[in-house]
Amino acid sequence: MTGYLRQYPPALQIATFFGLFIGFSLLYGIFLITVFPYISGYTIETLQTADPSLPKVLGYLKLTQFLYTLVVYLCPAALFAYLAAPSPAQWMHLQKAPRVLPAALAILVMLAALPVVGFAGDWNHTWQLSGSSMQMEEQAELLTRILLKMPNLGTLLVNIILIAILPAIAEEFFFRGVIQRLLIQAMPKIPWIAVLLTAVFFSAIHMEWLDFIPRIILGFLLGAIYYLSGNLWLSILGHFLNNGMQVVMVYLYQAKLIHDDPMQSETTAWYSAAISLIITVALLWYLRKRSDQPKLLTVKEPDIDSIGE
């Protein structure tokens, strides 16, 4: 293979990217098995059953979460962009800082959609899961609660980096920046199907089935923001807002500054969801009107004829 990956058919690019994803996932797994026990004194199994009230246990849990996001999502996406084009930032539509109005609209889209997401979550939580799936859900919820223990501002800032900033960048690079772009190139006549497929994969890979539908909706919104604006920074901003808002609300609850536990969601009325949906669609339409023409449908790259030279 010569030249940049953008010269090759989308199917080959997708296969290459998933090869990188598998490779970095294996690298992370090897680290957990071989190196991590020596530096921490825990295997990943004993760490998950250790007392989370111990500072070193919590610290190592956060370290594994940090490395997972960095190695499994950010590294393969960044490496692929580097191999795809002479300007990786331009290829991922990161070269321009977002203008104020599109950024504000992206924020409003994420806020306006909250009742829709909540309504979908109410329905999703009625699903009957198998015993093993329910056990996985309980373990994931327990880990989330452990990671979100924030007795002071220092732990709040650490969690904003760990749960909001890093995942927003890494996951948007991975899902919207690479996967969605390649799927749109593979099916340029049906780009919204590519956005939806990316959102489904985004939700499925988290393996939290009681939040499967809400995460699809969130992924679709982030994909729509990227597709309509042609600026990946806007979907990163939306992702950061979604995660960061949850972290801050949990901190405020633990500090007894608010009364309602944000991890115990209230039932959302159908009419609230309907109004939310209408407003969200209107905001996305306006975002499209106020953004530059998206350039995510390019299948033939400028130097396609240089293959083999």
Image: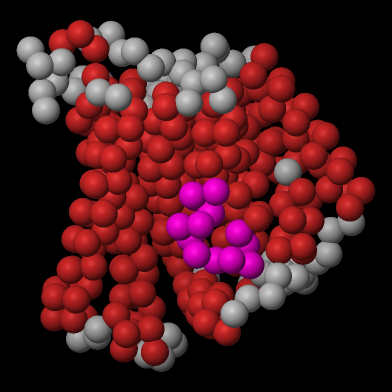
Residues in magenta, as a range: 200-212
* Relative horizontal placement of residue 36, taking residue 135 as reference (left or right): left
* Relative horizontal placement of residue 179, taking residue 126 as reference (left or right): left
Q: Residue at x 44, y 87 (%)?
A: 53
Looking at the rendering, in which quadrant would you find the N terminus?
top left
Among all residues in the image, which is located at the extreme right?
A: 271
Q: Nearer the viewer, residue 236 or 252?
A: 236
Q: Is residue 205 above or below residue 40?
A: above
Give how far across and how far down residue 155 sits, in percent: 46, 67
Looking at the rendering, in which quadrant would you find the C terminus?
top left
Tell me if I can see residue 138 in this picture: no
Give how far across and how far down residue 165 sits, in percent: 44, 49
Q: Is residue 210 magenta?
A: yes
Q: Nearer the viewer, residue 72 or 55?
A: 72
Q: Residue at x 67, y 14 (%)?
A: 289
Q: Residue at x 33, y 23 (%)?
A: 91
The colour scheme of the drawn protein is secondary structure
Q: Is residue 221 above or below residue 59?
A: above
Q: Residue at x 55, y 66 (%)?
A: 208
Q: Is residue 76 magenta?
A: no
Residue 130: name its quadrant: bottom right
Q: Nearer the viewer, residue 189 or 263?
A: 189
